Image (spheres, grey):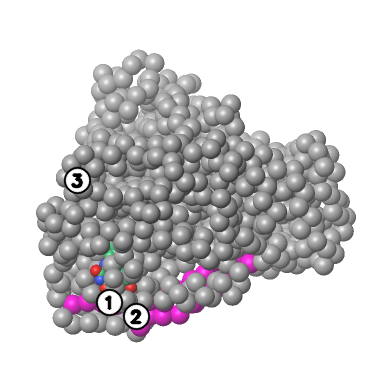
Amino acid sequence: MRRKLPRVQSGSGAVSIAFPKPDEAILSRRAQIIAGLQRLVAPEALITTEDERRAFETDGLTAYRQMPLAVLLPSSTEEVSAIMRFCQQNGVKVVPRGAGTSLCGGAIPQEDAIVLGVSKMNRVLDIDFENRTAHVEAGITNLAISQAVAHEGFFYAPDPSSQLACTIAGNIAMNSGGAHCLKYGVTTNNLLGVTLVLLDGTVVKLGGDHLDSAGYDLLGLVCGSEGQLGIVTEAVVRILRAAEGARPALFGFERVEDAGACVAAVIAAGIIPVALEYMDKPAIQICEAFAHAGYPLDVEAMLIVEVEGSDQEIDDMLRRIVAIAEPFRPKTIKVSQSEAESAAIWKGRKSAFGATGRVADYICMDGTIPTGQLPYVLKRIDEIAKSYGLGVANVFHAGDGNLHPLVMFNTNEPGEMEKAEKAGEDILRLCVEVGGCLTGEHGVGIEKRDLMTHQFNAADLAQQMRVRGVFDPLWLLNPAKVFPLDGRLAA
Amino acid sequence: MTLLLPRDEQDASTIIGEAAAKGTLLSLSGQNTKAAMGRPNQTDASVSSSALSGVTLYEPAELVISARSGTPVSEVVRTLAEKGQELPFEPVDYRPLLGSRGEPTIGAVAAMNISGPRRIMAGAARDSLIGVRFVNGRGEVIKSGGRVMKNVTGLDLVKLMSGSWGTLGFLTEVTFKVLPKPERMSTLLMRGLDDRAAIQALSQALGSPFDVTGAAHLPGRDRQGARTLIRLEGFSLSVDYRLNELRRLLKGFEAADILEGKGANALWQSVRDATVLTEQGERAVWRVSTAPTRGPDLAARVARSVDAQWFYDWGGGLVWIATPPAGDAGAAAIREATGIFGGHATLVRAPAEVRAQVDVFEPQTGPVMALTRGIKASLDPSGILNPGRMYAGL
Ligand SMILES: Cc1cc2nc3c(=O)[nH]c(=O)nc-3n(C[C@H](O)[C@H](O)[C@H](O)COP(=O)(O)OP(=O)(O)OC[C@H]3O[C@@H](n4cnc5c(N)ncnc54)[C@H](O)[C@@H]3O)c2cc1C
Ligand SMILES: Cc1cc2nc3c(=O)[nH]c(=O)nc-3n(C[C@H](O)[C@H](O)[C@H](O)COP(=O)(O)OP(=O)(O)OC[C@H]3O[C@@H](n4cnc5c(N)ncnc54)[C@H](O)[C@@H]3O)c2cc1C
């Protein structure tokens, strides 16, 4: 995520990721295409003026912008189906969109594509507490699902920090996670069914309100497919009864290695905390200055460990965790004793992105690493950032190996942003080298598209593209994303 | 029939590549046990993973294990147990049900995506499977996923491989997320409930904040009478607390018995492996997944036209049904019921004649079947891998 950035046109040289050249034939038929679409949807569902289209020109990766041909905001699966059929017949590209909070440019349009947004389809269709499922339209926000079931003490588990804004459609497309996925899993582990509109307008239902798919796991394939297989219009998700309570403890360590070893020891003791968050020194300093959370400023590394249950269970578990941590000589141990203290501990961590944005421009990276490699990776990240003359702060979901380095730079310094992008790429390559992945939860989008060859060889990528080709042989669905532009296969 | 035992991944790639060039049809197996499940199929040769054995990576602190596909499940389980860990999804052992003796392999567990009672809490085999290496029907070595829990990089082919019964590729190595073994397991046992009352109680327990990891109902046909089971796992103090809370919460459970130790383990194993139904002699056995509260309706519907026995796992969402092993083994009635109540049914055990005639896996709607065929062709264009194992002509 970046802020305060000047508008940059692709190809201007200011940023490094290329978009395919727009199809002139489509651009020249714009009026006809719009007229055709007009016949298919309610008037308010079609946005064509430049002013109104501008709101859809980018997503969370705001350095890149592209003005779409038109924007469609349908309100039913039937409308989506009609639009898709039309686009297939007319060779018009489609960029699906939820709330546009993607951090990897997954929802950024193309000039020769329409944006198909599901944000108007945001109703709860059915809640079944006995079977612990919620059936929703795909444009509903992540948080709204939890809010719709909260009165019975239930919630929807995956909780990306963007949950107030992001949609379940976007979550499904990105297989999004959150701070609590060590215990509850990510989107794919909490999704039971989807309604998917294929490019030819066919509506298919995958899964349902039962567990596991019949036949091939197409539901699992669609989850994380970044809008390249079809448009998700409805979803059935698992809802869970919330724990009776939750409370964190905070530990400060003088050495990165000690914090890493402490994480390993907690897990070796058979404890799976509901959250296990790591922050390095720059992140601690930045968050403390912003949130006044009471973080220790004299430590190299900090862990937030949260456990759930009744008061008695929480006390027991936190006692165990403190005992496990002690041999690693934590300089600070703070066990939350109240709601207010818990909120303060979390406020600092949760404001990490916003707080960083107050001190610098930054790129939020999202790689995964084997947790055991943390000390080495942090040392290397620091070296990489320094080699570009940049600063970096690291927050890390230590339980599941998902690392978010925030590479800081100054937009007003010419060339710094390119350096930050380069440093980011180096960091992601490092993640892959130590056995991790290019992305844990933010997706590939355009941001990591050209790095895919670093994680996958030609055969791996060809196989993925052949599977993709079953759904979209003509590359009309979100085609600028995920796969490097060269060497694309249809089926 | 020729039995091919690739020594390593490269060897497997060569064998399958040559078969693709010649159009040799291949059965894929772990221990090459005889007639396994699925539709009986005709092939020219069999490729077994049994020479691909051994744990290749185990990092207890990172909760991850990788093994070559032919590694016996028992070896994986033993390796994990040494560090107090386990496969979260409780892999089912079908040997008792099928009367077979082969040693189950970890690759087959991944290929079949079959999970036991803890599936409701810890997810299915496919949820724990985080990485695969396999040889596709072109003979190409492909990797997907990785050794870290979160990996959304590109299309999730791991999910496709899991539950594809060897029709999309020959797995050479699989990586699973693992969890610590709980310190204590305890079960609340309630007797005498009818199906509906039992499922209602299980729903209530599963909708409580008390982390139920097993919820089964065994209707009372034998001397034992009906038994309803709720399992709790974790640290001892926490299990005690939650047992008490659940007894308070569930009407009629105030006096429920508490089972622990060997007897309780054996009981959950018989639920996991469906041996609860093997007492029914040589009957056909179906495994039906549906929404929990519709389980009893579904079973009752089947029983209207078929002589059926059944029990429930997953809080009612998994109905195991035994039917007469002749004719269509109750297929028509069961498919009608899944049509009405939702869900899907798999014929797990039946004589080969029956399996050749009825759909073993739930038939798919036209468009989904078209996608299924497309995916099969994208991984195995010559159709040489386990042809017809899941669906006729696929
Ligand atoms: C401040 C901030 C914090 C964040 N924190 C987290 C976090 O903690 N964890 C995390 O995982 N992510 C996080 N994100 C990233 C982002 O919020 C997620 O990727 C989210 O799931 C995107 O949802 P969206 O509705 O905004 O989708 P969009 O950004 O609109 O789209 C995302 C992708 O989904 C596709 N898509 C959208 N709708 C559909 C549809 N109906 N059918 C098919 N494809 C579709 C798009 O084409 C695109 O590829 C954060 C983002 C921000 C800005
Ligand atoms: C439903 C079911 C029915 C069974 N029926 C019988 C039976 O009738 N007689 C008998 O002796 N045993 C039978 N078995 C028992 C089973 O074969 C044993 O439990 C066996 O030892 C399982 O391990 P395996 O590795 O031999 O699996 P297999 O039975 O060899 O394989 C199970 C499935 O997984 C696939 N598979 C296995 N390994 C791979 C791989 N490396 N890559 C891709 N796909 C793979 C197979 O193609 C098959 O579809 C059955 C098992 C199941 C689950």
Name the mark nearer the viewer: 3 or 1.
Answer: 3
Q: Earlier in the sequence, mark 3 or mark 1?
A: 1
Q: Earlier in the sequence, mark 1 or mark 2?
A: 1
The image position of residue B310, as x and y in percent, is 32, 49
Q: Residue at x 29, y 26 (%)?
A: A78
Res B26 visible: yes
Q: Residue at x 69, y 64 (%)?
A: A269
Q: Residues within 10 Å of mark 2 (few under 14, many from 20)?
A: many
Where is A220 relative to B18, above or below? above
- How far apart in space, not on screen, are marks 3 and 2 (Cα)? 40 Å
Q: Is mark 1 within 8 Å of ligand 2?
A: yes
Residue B70 is inside the magenta segment: yes
Q: Which of A89/A194 is in front?
A: A194
Letter of the chain that mark 3 sits on in the rendering: B
The image position of residue A99, as x and y in percent, is 50, 32
Please, what secondary structure does the residue beneath circle 3 have? loop
Region in magenta: B45-71
According to the picture, the residue beneath numbered tag 1 turns out to be B32
Letter of the chain that mark 1 sits on in the rendering: B
Quadrant (top left, top right, bottom left, bottom right) of the C terminus of chain A: bottom left
Type of amino acid under label 1: Asn
Q: Is mark 2 within 8 Å of ligand 2?
A: yes
Q: Residues within 10 Å of mark 3 (few under 14, many from 20)?
A: some
Please, what secondary structure does the residue beneath circle 1 have? loop
Which mark, residue B50?
2
